[in-house]
Amino acid sequence: MAKQFWLMKTEPDTFSIDDLSKRPGQTESWDGVRNYQARNYMRDQMKIGDGVLFYHSSCSPAGIAGEAKVASHPLPDPTALNPQSPYFDAKATPEKNPWALVKVAFVQKFKRFVTLDELRTLPGLENMVVLKKGMRLSIQPVTPEEFRLVLKLGKGK
DNA sequence: GCCAACGTTGGC
DNA sequence: GCCAACGTTGGC
């Protein structure tokens, strides 16, 4: 399948683009996703090398902080099996763990943080999922053209 | 901190 | 399988 593109949300207080860039191998497991639609995107559609817009949510301003890429096949999410984890799921077992993750690798931090407001005003992004009212999904598909436009903006061109 | 929008749960 | 109640998300 051709390379696909995604937007992945994270709260920068918990895990930011800078945190990702400081991880060993600049790679981290995207664990803790507990929404079926978001899980399905990871489990069923993501491929190694897919492009990721790294989105900072629940902060001011919210927006896209950088670029990452999918760095692993889908794997079972071990936090679902860990009673100490905030993402623990009592229904999950090692044999039957419904939750998945992929590893995500740092590509670049944007020279210019691209705010939501800016995305709203940019021609060509009218249908971008993250701009839709009430959209809370933490993993969203992005079109190649949207990805290209956001990257251009983030690089400061 | 507010609250609209949405997903999930559970009684029936 | 419906749907009201509840919890969560996330921008403001």
Image (tube, coloured by chain):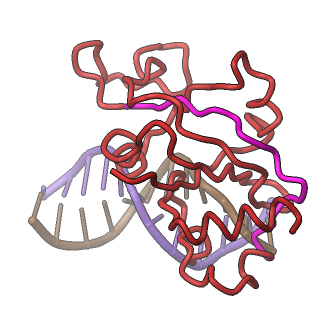
Chain colours: A red, B purple, C brown
For the magenta stretch, what is the residue range? A100-117
Q: Is residue A27 magenta?
A: no
Q: Residue at x 69, y 71 (%)?
A: A149
Q: In this view, does A155 lie to the left or right of A45?
A: right
Vertical order, A94 against A148 (above or below): above
Quarter of the figure with residue A131: bottom right
Q: Is residue C12 left or right of residue C6?
A: right
Q: Tell me where residue A123 appears, x and y as whole percent.
A: 69, 87
Between A51 and A131, the residue placed more toward the observer is: A51
Q: Residue at x 80, y 24 (%)?
A: A22
Total numbered labels placed on residues in the image: 0
Between A81 and A101, the residue placed more toward the observer is: A101
Quarter of the figure with residue A94: top left
Q: Tell me where residue A151 appears, x and y as whole percent.
A: 72, 61
Between C12 and A142, the residue placed more toward the observer is: A142
Quadrant in which the C terminus of chain A appears: bottom right
Q: Tell me where residue A44 appears, x and y as whole percent.
A: 30, 44
Q: Tell me where residue A60 appears, x and y as whole percent.
A: 86, 59
Q: Which residue is drawn at 46% across and 23% down?
A: A88
Q: Is residue A100 left or right of residue A127?
A: left
Vertical order, C8 against A62 (above or below): above
Q: In this view, does A28 lie to the left or right of A154?
A: left
Q: Is residue A101 magenta?
A: yes
Quarter of the figure with residue A47: top left
Secondary structure mainly formed by the magenta segment: strand
Q: Residue at x 54, y 52 (%)?
A: A138
Between A71 and A92, the residue placed more toward the observer is: A71
